[in-house]
Image (spheres, grey):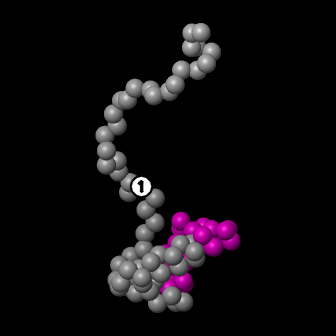
Amino acid sequence: MDIQAGATANLFALEKTILARNEGRDHPNEGPQILQDAARRCSPLKAAIDTRGDIGFNDESTDTADFLPTATASARAPSPETTPP
């Protein structure tokens, strides 16, 4: 699957999942079936599901910090009320 097909599959899956949620469906539990139904109308999504085999909804963040926070001094200018005349 190339990049364009993967992007199409992701977008179609996202749109169908949001539509299902907006229609009041229990998308976390019905998600695999929602995507299976959507794959009948989107061949890149069908190919992705066939390749992956399983469909999971993992809500854990995959973001990780790639930096270390460091303390810095405030760079605020003094307010006019605290500046001596």
Per the image, label 1 sits on a secondary structure element best described as loop
Name the amino acid type tagged 1. Answer: Ser
Which residue is depicted at the point 34% across and 37% down?
69
Which residue is depicted at the point 50% across and 27% down?
76
- Look at the image and tell me whether residue 67 can be seen: yes
The kind of secondary structure the magenta stretch mainly shows is helix
**21 on left or right of 32:** right
Which residue is depicted at the point 31% across and 44% down?
67
Q: How many marks?
A: 1
**Crowding at mark 1 (Cα within 10 Å: few <14, some 14-19, many 20+):** few
**Height in image: 31 above or below 49?**
above
Q: Please identify the quadrant where the C terminus is shown.
A: top right
- Look at the image and tell me whether residue 53 can be seen: no
**Height in image: 39 above or below 79?**
below
Q: Residue furthest top?
A: 85
Q: Residue furthest right?
A: 23
Residue 7: quadrant of the picture:
bottom left
Residue that badge 1 annotates: 61
Residue 31 is situated, as x and y percent measured from the top left of the image, at 52, 72
**48 on left or right of 16:** left
Residue 11 is situated, as x and y percent measured from the top left of the image, at 51, 76
Q: Residue furthest front?
A: 85
- Residue 28 shown in magenta: yes
Tell me which segment is drawn in magenta. Answer: 18-39
